[in-house]
Image (cartoon, rainbow, N blue to C red):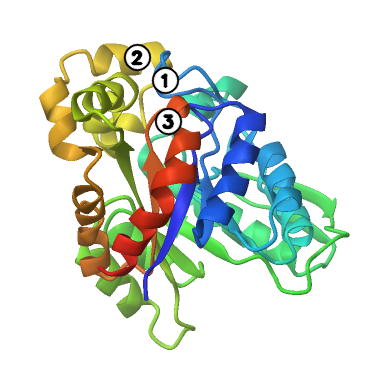
């Protein structure tokens, strides 16, 4: 049966609010919560971007059952992989093994801030592959000295490790990334409901343990459909650019300019909006049909979160689980 999660959208909410939303998501019955890990919001109107790892540490203490996951962290530029390995191990302990480390090759929006430039896609993939090797080595508990093509580590050791190694999930988008990362990761992450991603991943992992396939989709519940569409357009019009564009734009202002011609009707066609829970649930069906084992929903807009969690989440989850 598909598991359904809630997205802690750091780009649209402050840190205290995100912790309270995670508590509400657990009470509403969500199976897991994923957190974005950004330095900037996508658009200036979103208005937030707290440090995801501090938020997740607080959430780990404020919840008991909810599985937690980064969706996703880039372990190559803003963070050195040795630091990511330590953070992930600590969260594994704080959450009593409820943490899954979701990794990706990153976006210019967040990674350029450390002043190292922005590599081409093939180099970013090479960096991610090496980072995963180093994280795995450190999660073994052994003292590690690493001299690689992109990273160095000098006598590094993680002293506090959970009993079970933190599982790693990697964001993929096609055959190339699947063939590269399926053998070295535990689980798949993808933002498009494409069955060939799931089948290709499984084929590349023949002989390895069964893995989860984790997707994500935005929705915009609201009592008034027109207002919900307007909110989705205001905060999520960046979504229409596609990830090939989104990975390279450097600032929220750039996303604002790139999305200036995205119309409200364009957003309404791609994001289910309004009060109809059947319509919202049906928008998730393509992920279920494609074979995703886990799907996280993003409720667009900070101002709607409390009412969504208190009044809408439970009946929506009932409809989602019937898919």
Q: Which label sits in the foreground, 3 or 2? A: 3
In what element is the residue under mark 2? helix
Residue plotted at (72% across, 49% down): 62
Residue plotted at (49% across, 83% down): 209
Q: Which label sits in the foreground, 1 or 3? A: 3
The furthest residue to the bottom: 207
Instruction: Kindly identify which numbered label has been placed on residue 1.
Output: none
Reading the chain from its start, which is encountered first: label 1 or label 3? Answer: 1
Residue 308 showing in the rendered view = yes
Residue 69 showing in the rendered view = no
Mark 1 and mark 3 residues within 8 Å of each other at the beta carbon: no
- Which quadrant: the C terminus? bottom left
Query: Mark 2 sits on what residue?
Result: 254
Query: Mark 3 sits on what residue?
Result: 304
Query: Mark 1 sits on what residue?
Result: 250
Reading the chain from its start, which is encountered first: label 3 or label 2? Answer: 2
């Amino acid at each position: 049966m598909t598991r359904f999660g809630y997205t802690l959208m750091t780009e649209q909410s402050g840190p205290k609010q995100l912790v309270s939303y995670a508590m509400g998501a657990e009470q509403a019955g969500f199976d897991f919560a994923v957190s974005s890990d950004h330095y900037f919001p996508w658009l200036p109107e979103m208005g937030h971007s707290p440090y995801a790892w501090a938020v997740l540490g607080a959430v780990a203490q404020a919840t008991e059952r909810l599985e937690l996951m980064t969706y996703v962290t880039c372990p190559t530029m803003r963070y050195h992989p040795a630091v990511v390995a330590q953070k992930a191990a600590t969260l594994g302990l704080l959450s009593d093994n409820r943490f899954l480390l979701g990794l990706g090759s990153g976006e210019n929006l967040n990674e350029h801030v450390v002043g190292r430039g922005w590599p081409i896609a093939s180099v970013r993939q090479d960096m991610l592959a090496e980072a995963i090797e180093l994280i795995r080595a450190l999660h073994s508990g052994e003292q590690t000295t690493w001299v690689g093509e992109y990273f160095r580590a000098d006598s590094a050791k993680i002293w506090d490790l959970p009993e079970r190694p933190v599982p790693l999930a990697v964001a993929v988008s096609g055959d190339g990334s699947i063939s590269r990362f399926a053998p070295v990761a535990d689980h798949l992450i993808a933002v498009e409901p494409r069955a060939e991603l799931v089948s290709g991943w499984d084929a590349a992992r023949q002989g390895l343990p069964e893995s989860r396939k984790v997707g994500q989709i935005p929705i915009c519940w609201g009592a008034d459909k027109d207002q919900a569409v307007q909110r989705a357009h205001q905060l999520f019009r960046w979504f229409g650019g596609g990830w090939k564009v989104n990975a390279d734009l450097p600032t929220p202002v750039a996303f604002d300019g790139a999305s200036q011609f995205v119309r409200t009707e364009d957003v309404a066609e791609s994001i289910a909006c309004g009060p109809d829970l059947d319509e919202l649930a049906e928008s998730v069906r393509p992920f279920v049909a494609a074979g995703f084992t886990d799907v996280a929903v993003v409720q667009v807009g900070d101002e709607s979160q409390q009412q969504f969690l208190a009044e809408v989440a439970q009946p929506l989850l009932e409809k989602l689980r019937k898919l």
